[in-house]
Image (tube, rainbow, N blue to C red):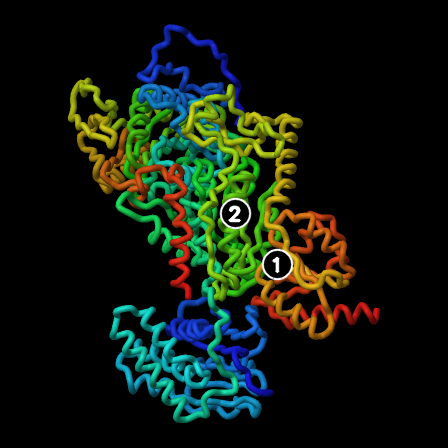
Amino acid sequence: MSGHKVNNFVLKMANVNGTGSASANGLVSKAIFRMGVPMSAKNFFPSNIQGLPTWYEIRISGDGYRARAGQVDVMVAMNAQTYKRDVAEVCSGGYLIYDSTWPWDEQLSRDDVTFIGVPFARMASEAFTGSRIRILMKNVIYAGALAALLDIDMAVIKQLLKDQFGDKQHLIDANHKAIALGYDFAKENFDCPLHCRLESDSKTDGQIVIDGNAAAALGCLYAGATVGAWYPITPSTSLMDAFAGYCNKFRSGDEGNRFMIIQAEDELAAIGMVVGASWNGARAFTPTSGPGISLMSEFIGFAYYTEIPAVLFDIQRVGPSTGMPTRTQQCDILICAYASHGDTQHVCLYPANPEECFEMAADAFDLAERLQTPVFVVSDLDIGMNEWACPEFTWDDARRPDRGEVLDAEQLAAIEKFHRYLDDDNDGIAARSLPGVHPKGAYFTRGSGHNKFGGYTEDADEYQEVLDRLKFKFNEARHRVPAAVESGAHDGEVGIIAYGSSDGAMIEALDRLKEQGLDAAYLRIRGFPFGSEVQKFIDRHEVVFIVEQNRDAQMRTLLMNDLGVRRDDLVPLLHYSGLPIYADFIVQGVLNHLQQRKTA
Amino acid sequence: MSHIAKPAARHPGQPVNKLGFSERDYEGGMSTLCAGCGHDSITAALVKAFFELDIEPHRVAKLSGIGCSSKTPAYFLSASHGFNSVHGRMPSVVTGANAAERSMAYVGVSGDGDSLSIGIGQFAHAVRRNLNMLYIIENNGVYGLTKGQFSASADLGSKPKKGAPNQLSPIDPVNMAISMGASFVARSFSGDKDQLVPLIKAGIRHDGFALIDVISPCVTFNDHDGSTKSYQYTRDNIVETIHTDFVPPRQEITVDFASGEVTSVRLHDGSHMLLKKVDKAYNADDRAAAISYIQHHQAEGRVVTGLLYFDGAEPEFHQVSGTCQEPLRDLPHNELCPGSEALAKLMKGYR
């Protein structure tokens, strides 16, 4: 390793799932964050409850980079099943900490890595009684050892334990004991701190650590969503868990719950419930993942055609089919945009981080009710389930939900006759009524052919008139979805388009490219249908890359379809292993392509 | 679904209910089902029941799935909110609608294909949630719109118009619902308006899931010799177990049944159901006994009708969820959004 890495390295824990390592790992990452050092933490976990390998990777970056680094400096190897690959992953000059209760297989050793043996299991069994507590405390002991080795502030750790366990003094005592065991052992036996170490800073002031699903749930709460229907599916489950937690905190009382969360029998029912509740005037949503979107497609088309608002969160995971449920991808771009049979198109929002999950969740309800159509918040496992440091969320108390064109009892009483699909003001949107509000508001909602009056029709012209208005309405959405944001060079020849969770890697890649003499422009797409700024960006650059986390360049297809961009005008850089994309992948992809162009 | 508009002409001497509506105000468009279809009789019974219950039509939501039965919401209560959803998924839409607005009346109309094949999952879970709604299955044993295939409720050995007799055991929604914990389960016959109307009224007023499985012969595809869902077969084999009458709130209860044991059951809104046991051996409050009785008669080819199971104490959907009384959709924003100060405080927990 060349020189010291202060506040700039990657710490990775290799564990066995179901052994309680998450709380020890969380303690370490939170302590780093509270020391004022920017960090982001990612879980790489199996689709399993107990016994399989799981990893927790903390990117410590004084520069504030939030993406995966693509290499590991310090590995805590607590799982003998994966020793071999864990050793291989450590970069030259790095460290590997292992449990020396058992002899180390010298065949696994590397000359360019420092091996640090700590007898975690022996210390845990000597200091604690009971098999479960020993397993748990073994993890806390390595957290203590890391505190010494990496120079983590012990006062911060103690405060965290106090915050976490409150008045459960016996738990605080046990954790203190374990921390001290690891800390003292490391101090006595090794040259602390290592070359990779921490130094207190103030760069996380005004920041929080939160996952995207909790952030989205908070957005739903603040938007005034009252009905949540769902079917459990990884990686979206924590969104509804978080929503339930917030509702219990803020919307419960003696008068009863001001929310209804329905665990549906399947995704088909979950979306049916959302459609029913939205039809009846509540703000309703469902969180799901790709397989759920497949199942919901019939109702999504129904809601599109009958013009019923619906908010769907697709926390994307690796497909096709069951795929890899605990790995990340951006592979539902097309299905979200076009879900269901017939001519359907859907508004999509692409958050890049938890702060946008919060904002876009709230925006999605406004858009869905304004446009009377399903709106997708297309997140992914990386954003949804990993812990991100981000600015504290804020809320404007003057903000009121946009409930769209809904006629109240007074308005209904004043009109001669209500026609559900009559667009009086030519904005593509027809005013709706809510059931039970006024006798004049009654109409028949049907997925079968209907005319602008809401009546059943099999008449060619009447059918087409409604379908054309839907197209017109969708086009209007271009101006309403969040615009793409541009950064980087203003007058370069190279432009890069990305979206969603690729943002972290993109920001870092732009800096790396600049170091290598390439000043590229970056456009981050945030909504579909695309605004004119996307077309302008593509037109302005000689070479345009599109960075995606799927195999088939789905966003490119969407751009071609929606804007008429030529396929060859967009060079795809595709990362679809299931692990989050990292900067170097983009840097190498861009440089390689430009090199090829030169030689061609 | 298709319907033919009815002329608006109205007889001035038509009787009106307490709200001043005539029965005509509870009708819908003209049916486009086959002449003589059992479903049209059920539609007529619904019209009569809602008229007699003095319910404002616009406070009713009528929902359905896909199929002949699901077309019928267009033929009653044209002043109500209709929702013709996707095949077999009406229960989930009612669940969401009811979650949003608990004070309206919800009636779902489905068929044996819609509820017992493609929609059996949603049907089962609506029962399980004790969703406050009236759920009518217009049961004819066949798929009419696709021209006469057997449905999952076709009886073993029932003969189709063409081809071989049915060899698969039927799924019986009544047995299913009772065994899954339904709180109000009835069976009736489209040709028995005297029985059907009070059952519908009681089902609407019941605070929970009310299932009425109505044998409704398909005159085009399943009304011939050898069919077990024909008018003739049903009339020949019907066994009324408990006769039901419905008495609205504040109306004097006068027992006009000639004889037998009569029980009065008070419903949530103060109305009463009068239950007269036609067969004294029958117990409508004992799940196991009810199932055993129904299955015994089924084995003999008899169709047991009436209110077959009732439990007025079972908590319904909202009670189980602990929802507030005010409909969720009507809650003002400030009761839903905790505001900036609460958010700032919450953020401290994420440090």
Label 2 CA crowd tier, 10 Å (few <14, some 14–19, many 20+): many
Q: Quadrant of residue A246?
A: bottom left
Viewport quadrant of the N terminus of chain A: bottom right
Residue A157: give x, y in percent of width and height: 37, 76
- The answer to which of marks 1 and 2 sits earlier in the sequence is 2
Residue B342: give x, y in percent of width and height: 38, 54
Query: Is B259 or A377 nearer to us in this picture?
Result: A377
Judge left or right: residue A449 versus residue B202.
right
Q: Label 1 vs label 2: CA separation?
A: 17 Å
Residue B82 in the image: above or below residue A520: above
Say if residue A52 shows up in the picture. no
Which amino acid does the dot numbered 2 rest on?
Ala
Residue A164 in the image: above or below residue B243: below
Residue A400: give x, y in percent of width and height: 47, 43
Query: Is A356 or B178 nearer to us in this picture?
Result: A356
Q: Residue at x 76, y 59 (%)?
A: A541
Q: Which residue is most to the right? A: A600
Circle 2 residue: A364
Q: What SS does tag 2 mark?
A: helix
Which amino acid does the dot numbered 1 rest on?
Tyr
Residue A55 in the image: above or below residue A182: above
Label 1 CA crowd tier, 10 Å (few <14, some 14–19, many 20+): many
**To which chain does the residue with label 1 belong?**
A
Say if residue B96 shows up in the picture. yes
Residue A179: give x, y in percent of width and height: 35, 81
Q: Quadrant of residue A579?
A: bottom right
Tell me, for residue A122, which label it has, or none: none
Circle 1 residue: A499
